[in-house]
Amino acid sequence: MPHVPPFPADVDVAVVSHNGRDVLPRMLACLMAANAPQERITVYDVASTDETSAWLAAEWPGVSVDRLPVNNGPDPGRNRALRQCTRPYLLLLDADAFVRPDMAARLREALDPAAGVACTVPVVVHTQAPGTIQYAAGSMHFICEAVNPYQDRPLIERGTDKRDIGAAPGVAYLIDVAVSKKIGDFDERYFIGKEDGDFCHRIVMAGYRLVEDGAALVEHRSKPRTAWLFPCQIRNRWHFLLRNYELRTLVLMIPALMVHEPMQLAMIVAKGHFGAYRRALRELIPWLKTLRAERREIAAFRRRPDGELFIASPLVIRQDFVGGGIGRVIKDAYDLWLRSYWAAIKPLLR
């Protein structure tokens, strides 16, 4: 049997779950295999209808349960966990995050406040194919889209080194709780979509480091996101741009946005989702009332300019939107054009 290191003494564990009765047995068993003390684990049960809370009380009496009566996405549970954490660091997990026995210890070793590291994350692999990467080495594209260069590539290609990254999915984070108080909560308005990227972006924007340890692994039950999420993803991306980007960046991006936004709309309409676009715009408008105050708050803790925070690697776009043949050629050409555009404006953002 391989040696399992002790669970870090200064780490609490929070699991955010909605109708997670089918995954929590394995998830909690993984935490036990990692030597996590039950009394330091809290499950934030987000308005489940599958008797999660009753099952936990019967089968895992040593694990605390905090039930949220309304399902407003994972962020209210995440924020409550950060506020209630009694130790300096919080291991924040989704209910379908099946941690490897040494993951928590590795993440804690990589979390070095003296070196500016505020959050550490593992490489995320598919549960059904644990030798294949789901998320690794993530970043934010300057057009405000995800960059996931190792998606569906063999795990061995990533290597086991530690890397500073720009974004990570909210599957598993080890967070310095003191830093989270400085940069603000997960945005509870987002429900889902860009909420994890927004939190990560504020970490690195504030001058802290987000580090991915290639030797730390978590299995995640991957499943395709369905069309009901489109309004959230579209709305949240627009808000992310308007709140987090410097004014100079937004001005210089206007030509790129004048290309990207109509292309995005055309793809959405072609797939029959124009209603999602209209809903996103309708829901964004009330948020604009607080935008100026939010931008002031972010400017107060910003330590790094946009030119240091974004990249222009190939975009992650659903295959059914791209298609094959000519669709792939157009996407590759568009990625090249965006890369060239970023190279032209990046020197002006320092």
Image (tube, helix red, strand yellow):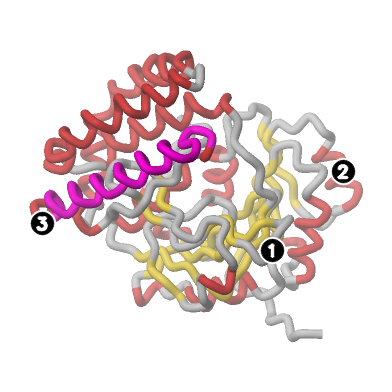
34 left or right, relative to 165: right
Mark 1: give few (<14), some (14-19) or many (20+) Cα within 10 Å: some
Q: Does the magenta-highlighted stretch encompass residue 344?
A: yes
Identified at 57% across, 74% down, the residue is 156
Q: What residue type is labelled 3?
A: Pro
User: How far from the left and from the top, in percent, is residue 124?
Assistant: 59, 60
* Residue at the farthest left position: 348
Residue 331 in the image: state x and y as whole percent: 37, 42
Q: Quadrant of residue 268?
A: top left
At label 2, the amino acid type is Trp
Q: Residue at x 29, y 37 (%)?
A: 241
First in sequence: mark 2 vs mark 1: 2
Residue toward you, 217 or 57: 217
The segment highlighted magenta reads 320-346
Looking at the picture, how far across and down is residue 78, in whole percent? Answer: 56, 45
Q: Which mark is residue 55?
A: 2
Q: Which amino acid does label 1 sit on?
A: Pro
> What's the distance in space between the residues labelled 3 and 1, CA to CA?
40 Å
Which residue is drawn at the image coordinates 15% and 39% (left, top)?
247
Q: In this view, does 346 lie above or below 158?
A: above
Give whichever of discs 2 and 3 has the lower sequence position.
Answer: 2
Select label 2 or label 3 by which is in front.
Answer: 3
Task: Indicate which disc residue 130 carries.
Answer: 1
Callout 3 environment at 10 Å: few (<14), some (14 to 19), or many (20+)? few
Separation of residues labelled 2 and 3 (CA atoms):
56 Å
Q: In this view, does 82 lie above or below 129?
A: above
- On-image quarter of the N terminus: bottom right
Residue 347 is tagged as 3
At label 2, counting other C-alpha atoms closer than 10 Å, the crowd grade (few under 14, some 14-19, many 20 or more) is some
Under circle 3, the secondary element is: helix
